[in-house]
Image: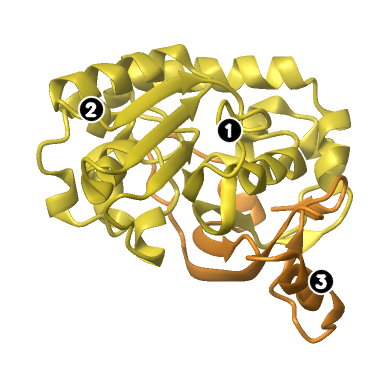
Amino acid sequence: MKNSGQAHDQVSVVAVEELRQAIRDEYAAVARSPEQGFHFHTGRPLAGMLGYDATWLDGIPEDTLSSFAGTGNPFRMGALLPGEHVVDVGCGAGLDSLIAAQMVGAEGHVIGVDMTPAMLAIARASASETASANVTFHEGYAEALPVVDGWADVVISNGVLNLVPDKAAALAEMARVLRPGGRLQIGDILVQRPVPESAKRKIDLWTG
Amino acid sequence: MAAGFVGFEITWRADVFTGAPQASSAANFGTLGMNFRARKPHTQQEWLAAVSDSSDTSFCPVTPAQTEI
């Protein structure tokens, strides 16, 4: 992470709503047909690649597991504790939310937020199937989280920030919903070579 | 109190795109998967101390127009 004005610059170089719709379309396709193959890995093989313990995946409904498309592992940076409040930003089909719900237990609570209805439908069905009463899912954007100030002990996210046009706004929202001392545990991507301005304007490069 | 995080640390990075079913632009930019963590300061004093310590590169202000992943 570095300090620059580039995040806001990115808002101006792409059409935000066009980008969001392209991302919704891409991840709705993952939700509908995860077996079709994408430019990223998905499902149980990806979870293994990212170091998810097999025990975390026990009991996770197949629709949620097969639609998993993370780029890291938020749980490798520290355990979630019983009773903690967790926000999962860009929860997708709910894999990380459901794992977090198991970790925080009945006294804890997880709020998953995503902008893709097709993914949220799977997440809600899986929460119902697993009788996970301590997790709720809400439609929303990373830049405007539907969570009150200071509610969360931990914010997790996985493969989402790189898709958010206004990263500064998303990080500010994460800071807002965290209590003082709250933790950020994020899986995402980094680039080792500069991305030209011309490339940033190509929405198909954001999604692929 | 300015928004921001302290204790920023990248804890893992790896190629998570090679071998994906479809060709990706990721390789063109040396794209890796990564894990990172940080913490919201407990107090404004902790935040100001992190910002004022020029040797501390683990703080991340997220006030407008300052931060990029």
**In this rendering, would A54 be left or right of A135?**
left
Task: Kindly identify the residue that appears in the image at 43 percent across and 34 percent down.
Answer: B22
When the figure is inspected, residue A181 is found, relative to residue B67, above or below; the finding is below
- Tag 2: residue type? Ala
For mark 1, give the secondary structure.
Answer: loop
Give me the disc on residue A36: none
- Front residue of this view, candidates A20 and A139: A139
Judging by the rendered image, the residue that carries numbered circle 3 is B48
When the figure is inspected, residue A2 is found, relative to residue A129, above or below; the finding is below
**In this rendering, would A176 be left or right of A13?**
left
Instruction: Give the alpha-carbon distance from disc 3 to disc 1, as whole Å.
Output: 25 Å
Please provide percent x and percent y for residue A179. Answer: 57, 52
Give me the disc on residue A133: 2
- Front residue of this view, candidates A150 and A144: A150
Chain where mark 2 sits: A
Q: Please name the color used to draw chain B.
A: orange
